[in-house]
């Protein structure tokens, strides 16, 4: 049975795991960032001094064997004033209660995962209370994950001010992986926060398993303005090590001009291949959907690409 590890965070990771959980005969692990500091997650983090849980909760619901009323409830957000429960997410509150009851964020995740009948393991990259910083190309430093895209400048790199300890479980999962996947989603605020945790990139480097990157279909305003496919890979290597990516999956299907125009109005452009020669392999696949005039990766199409790779690798 193959061990598949996916590294990321945010909505993109949830989309991937919703598809990958359907693959039979694999041990699936999601290594999730805990650098989020906005919204309900940020408030709970500040008040109770526990790791950010929003991305963990989202991935947990996506990896549930069956998505039922209970998984929907986990994403329910209360109306009302922020001085009360207003703006809080029910799943976040339950994870907070479980953390206080069990005395461990990791144990809370395990307990909640059993309740939701999650396929695979959800592993925070760290249990530290961490703050992500970004150094902009012109030298400005921006503090806080939620503030980085809003600054709307070109990012040179992201970093932590202090050493961040990895979880033993994350290092072990990477060490035992037969396939490592970098998830879709925000490049600097979903993937990188994991790779710059002390020891994570080194463990990835030491593992000789293939490393696949699902490149974003569109640039993200405030993070990857003007980025080509190659720029995305160079950014990953800058935050980890040369040769961190063996295979890049990019899309073949193209959105309509009407949809692209809407995205252009929001400052987002298609991510294109800009160079002819690459030290990594590029696979072009039909991986997108355009439902509700949104450009998104399709969970089932991602599943098919990974299944194809696993079958070929046998």
Image (spheres, rainbow, N blue to C red):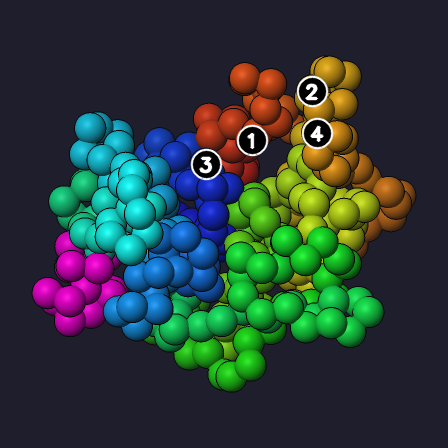
Give the left or right position of residue 287, taking residue 227 as reference: left
Label 2 and label 1: CA atoms lie apart by 15 Å
Label 4 and label 2: CA atoms lie apart by 6 Å
First in residue order: circle 2 vs circle 3: 3
**In this picture, is 259 found above or below 264?**
above
Callout 2 touching callout 3 (CB < 8 Å): no
Decide if residue 284 is in sight here.
no
Residues under numbered marks 1 and 4 in contact, where contact means CB atoms less than 8 Å apart: no
Magenta segment: 96-111
Q: Based on the picture, tell me whether residue 269 belongs to the magenta stretch.
A: no
Asked whether disc 1 touches disc 3, contact meaning CB atoms under 8 Å apart, the reply is: yes
CA gap, disc 2 and disc 3: 21 Å
Point out the frontmost of discs 2 and 1. Answer: 2
Residue 159, image x, y percentages = 60, 73
Q: Looking at the image, is mark 3 or mark 4 nearer the viewer?
A: 4
Badge 2 is on which residue? 259
Label whose residue precedes the other's in the sequence (3 or 4):
3
Question: Looking at the image, which residue is at 73% across and 62% down?
Answer: 155
- Determine whether the residue tagged by mark 2 lies in a helix, strand or loop: helix
Q: Residue at x 68, y 73 (%)?
A: 141
Task: Say which element carries label 3.
Answer: helix
- Comparing marks 2 and 3, which lies closer to the viewer? 2
Q: Residue 93 vs residue 6: left or right?
A: left
Q: What x and y, as percent, mark residue 105?
A: 24, 65
Please name the residue that numbered disc 4 is placed on: 263
Residues at marks 1 and 3, CA–CA distance in whole angstroms: 7 Å
Disc 3 crowd, CA 10 A, few/some/many (<14, 14-19, 20+) = many
Which residue: 55% across, 76% down?
Answer: 160
- Which residue in the protein does label 1 denote? 297
Q: Residues within 10 Å of mark 1 (few under 14, many from 20)?
A: many
Within the image, what quadrant is residue 245 found in? bottom right
Residue 300 image point, x, y percent: 46, 26
């Amino acid at each position: 049975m193959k061990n598949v590890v996916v590294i990321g965070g945010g909505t993109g990771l949830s989309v991937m795991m919703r598809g990958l959980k359907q693959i039979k005969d694999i041990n699936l692990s999601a290594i999730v960032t805990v650098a989020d500091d906005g919204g309900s997650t940020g408030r709970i983090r500040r008040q109770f001094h526990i790791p950010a849980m929003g991305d963990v909760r989202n991935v947990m619901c996506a990896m549930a064997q069956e998505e039922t009323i209970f998984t929907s409830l986990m994403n329910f957000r209360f109306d009302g004033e922020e001085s009360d429960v207003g703006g809080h997410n029910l799943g976040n509150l339950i994870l907070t209660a479980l953390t206080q009851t069990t005395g461990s964020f990791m144990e809370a995740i395990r307990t909640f995962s059993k309740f939701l009948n999650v396929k695979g393991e959800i592993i925070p990259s760290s249990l530290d209370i961490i703050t992500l910083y970004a150094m902009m190309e012109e030298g400005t430093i921006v503090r806080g994950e939620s503030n980085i895209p809003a600054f709307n400048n070109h990012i040179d790199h992201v970093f932590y001010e202090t050493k961040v300890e990895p979880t033993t479980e994350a290092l072990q999962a990477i060490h035992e992986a037969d396939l490592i996947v970098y998830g879709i989603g925000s490049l600097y605020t979903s993937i990188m926060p994991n790779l710059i945790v002390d020891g994570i990139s080194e463990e990835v480097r030491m593992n000789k398993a293939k490393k696949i990157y699902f490149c974003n279909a569109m640039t993200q305003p405030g993070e990857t303005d003007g980025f080509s496919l190659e720029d995305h890979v160079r950014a990953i290597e800058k935050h980890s090590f040369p040769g961190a990516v063996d295979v890049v999956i990019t899309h073949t299907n193209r959105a309509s001009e009407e949809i692209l125009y809407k995205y252009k109005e929001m400052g987002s452009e298609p991510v294109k291949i800009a160079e002819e020669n690459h030290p990594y392999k590029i696979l072009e696949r039909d991986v997108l959907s355009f439902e509700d005039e949104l450009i998104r990766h399709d969970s089932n199409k991602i599943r098919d690409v990974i299944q194809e790779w696993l079958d070929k690798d046998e």
